[in-house]
Image: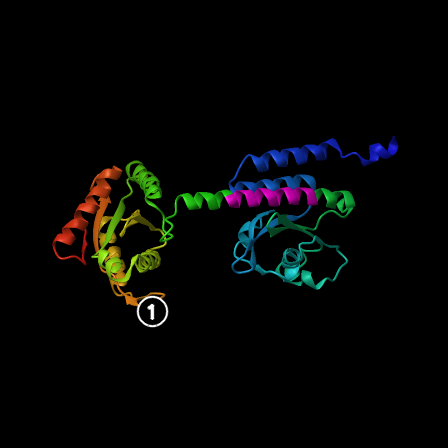
């Protein structure tokens, strides 16, 4: 009877696990999930600092996604290479690492240099999901009397459930991204344009902030399909979309409206600024030489019409129609120009 009682999980710990499981399954927002993980870690084990690092698979680096203990701002720009330091080792090997206070483990060198006299010990756990290790949790200077096998085992359970929740959130984000992305160009699609433009027009009305829209139509694009085939035409559309994104400002959104038509949405941008930016973009696009996979060099010409809310209206139909009307006026006048009024 005594042995059974000793092996029972304390009710408080079961409640922590139950609350974490409910919290992680109630949201697919990644930031909410990460904060929930650290909040429950803080409740379960006392320490000076908790951090959660996520893996950037492309660069094979870890970045500090979130931190408790007032260190989030200080860690925001730091990166850890996979295989380097405590977190890098944990992600590379997919194993937990416990470094006690008396250790001179070389993997602690970077941490101790960054925070002299502050980092004495650490527990680092991998976030292992179905698709591999996606990050790590670091717990700095945990209380020595809490480093029992039971505590470490329970932390593993929490970390494993956290990893599954993170993967689920990322999968949902990928699916959502697919629903708003045009297959050919990789730009946002017209359905997403309507959503974003609607929100920007609401801001325009409620906060008196201008929003401008550039409607871009490629000139005589049908000739590319007729002379070089639809595969080349699709490739040129894709390259044009990427070039428009490169030429646009960070705050602007690029959309494929349909066929060979594109839209650039410019939040908080008045008519004069929009005309200057559209002119730069137009010149950059017209001067770009696109080298096709076949080796064929191609260029594009475009006619651009601009509109600005609230001057041109505060409804989606009014703003898009005004830009479309000016674009067709450019077509009528000889193509290859930008018109703002």
Which residue does the image show at 63% across and 33% down from the upper left? 19
Quarter of the picture holding the N terminus: top right
Report whether residue 38 is seen.
Answer: no
Residue at image position (66%, 59%) is: 89
Q: Position of residue 125 (x, y in %)?
A: 67, 50
Can residue 224 be seen by looking at this rendering? yes
* Colour theme: rainbow
Image location (x, y in percent) of residue 104 = 74, 62
Residue 141 horizontal/vertical position (percent): 70, 51
Numbered marks: total:
1
- Badge 1 local density, few (<14 within 10 Å), some, or many (20+)? few
Q: Quadrant of residue 4?
A: top right
* Picture quadrant where residue 10 is located: top right
**Majority secondary structure of the magenta segment?**
helix
Q: Which residue is mark 1?
A: 295
Residue 170 on the magenta segment: yes
Residue 150 percent location from the top left of the image: 77, 42
> Toward the viewer: 282 or 234?
234
Judge whether residue 40 is colored magenta.
Answer: no
102 displayed left or right of 202: right
Query: Which residues fall within the magenta stretch?
Result: 156-171
Disc 1, SS: loop
Above or below 45: residue 115: below
Instruction: Give the residue at the far left of this rendering.
Output: 333
In depth, the one of 174 and 147 nearer the eye is 174
Residue 137 located left or right of residue 311: right
């Amino acid at each position: 009877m005594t042995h059974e009682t000793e092996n029972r999980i304390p009710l408080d710990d079961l409640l922590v696990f139950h609350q974490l499981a409910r919290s992680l399954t109630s949201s697919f927002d990644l930031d909410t999930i990460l904060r929930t993980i650290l909040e429950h870690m803080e409740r379960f084990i006392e320490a000076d600092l908790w951090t959660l690092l996520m893996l950037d698979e492309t660069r094979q680096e870890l970045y500090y996604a979130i931190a408790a203990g007032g260190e989030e701002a200080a860690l925001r720009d730091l990166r850890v290479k996979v295989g380097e330091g405590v977190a890098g080792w944990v992600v590379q090997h997919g194993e937990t690492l416990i470094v006690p206070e008396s250790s001179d483990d070389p993997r602690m060198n970077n941490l101790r240099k960054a925070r002299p006299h502050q980092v004495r010990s650490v527990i680092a756990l991998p976030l292992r999901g179905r698709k591999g290790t996606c990050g790590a949790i670091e717990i700095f200077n945990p209380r020595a009397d809490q480093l029992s096998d039971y505590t470490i085992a329970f932390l593993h359970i929490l970390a494993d459930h956290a990893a599954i929740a993170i993967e689920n959130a990322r999968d949902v984000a990928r699916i959502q991204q697919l629903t708003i992305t045009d297959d050919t160009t990789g730009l946002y699609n017209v359905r997403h344009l309507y959503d974003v433009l609607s929100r920007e027009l609401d801001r325009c009305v409620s906060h008196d902030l201008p929003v401008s829209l550039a409607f871009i139509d490629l000139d005589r694009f049908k000739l590319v399909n007729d002379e070089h085939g639809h595969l080349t035409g699709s490739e040129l559309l894709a390259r044009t979309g990427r070039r428009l994104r490169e030429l646009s400002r960070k705050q602007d959104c690029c959309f494929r409206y349909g066929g060979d038509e594109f839209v650039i949405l410019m939040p908080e941008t008045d008519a004069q600024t929009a005309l200057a930016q559209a002119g730069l973009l137009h010149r950059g696009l017209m001067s770009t030489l696109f080298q096709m996979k076949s080796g064929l060099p191609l260029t594009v010409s475009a006619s651009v019409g601009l509109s600005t809310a609230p001057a041109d209206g505060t409804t989606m139909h009014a703003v898009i129609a005004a830009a479309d009307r000016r674009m067709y006026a450019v077509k009528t006048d000889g193509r290859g120009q930008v018109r703002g009024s």
